[in-house]
Image (cartoon, rainbow, N blue to C red):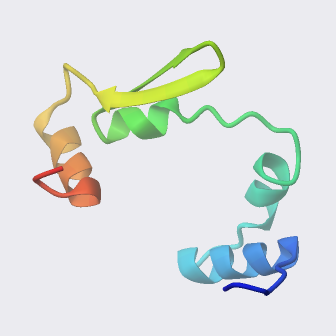
Amino acid sequence: LAGRTYEFADIVRVASEVSGTDQSAFLSEFVDGTGFLDAAPYFESAGLQLDSFADEFYVSDAPNAGTEQAAIREAIFGKDR
């Protein structure tokens, strides 16, 4: 919403409401803090591959994705992406 300032507590509150679980520890560590979130396993579960080069990250379809992974990827992005 334009012109509105949000506090970190607002983000925590909304994320917790949407997910149905308290997200304060996660967001404090990985958003407000300096924790490293290894996102590769989350991408892999959806049949995606996360690669990095020169401090940039690239997401592509994993060549060996199974049918369950492909179904997850399709549920997120749609069939005709």
Lateral position of residue 52 relative to residue 4, left or right: left
> Where is residue 25 drawn, in percent x and y?
80, 59
Lateral position of residue 56 relative to residue 44, left or right: right
> Nearest the camera: 49 or 20?
49
Q: Residue at x 11, y 38 (%)?
A: 67
Above or below, 17 against 55 in this view is below
Q: Residue at x 18, y 58 (%)?
A: 78
> Where is residue 64 drawn, in percent x and y?
19, 20
> Where is residue 69 drawn, in percent x and y?
22, 40
Above or below, 81 against 36 in this view is below
- Count of numbered marks: 0
> Where is residue 33 drawn, in percent x and y?
88, 47
Lateral position of residue 39 relative to residue 68, left or right: right
Q: Quadrant of residue 2?
A: bottom right
Q: Residue at x 66, y 19 (%)?
A: 55
Q: Quadrant of residue 46?
A: top left
View extreme (front): residue = 3
Lateral position of residue 53 relative to residue 78, left or right: right
> Nearest the camera: 18 or 11?
11
Instruction: Pick the quarter of the image with the N terminus.
Output: bottom right
Q: Residue at x 75, y 74 (%)?
A: 11
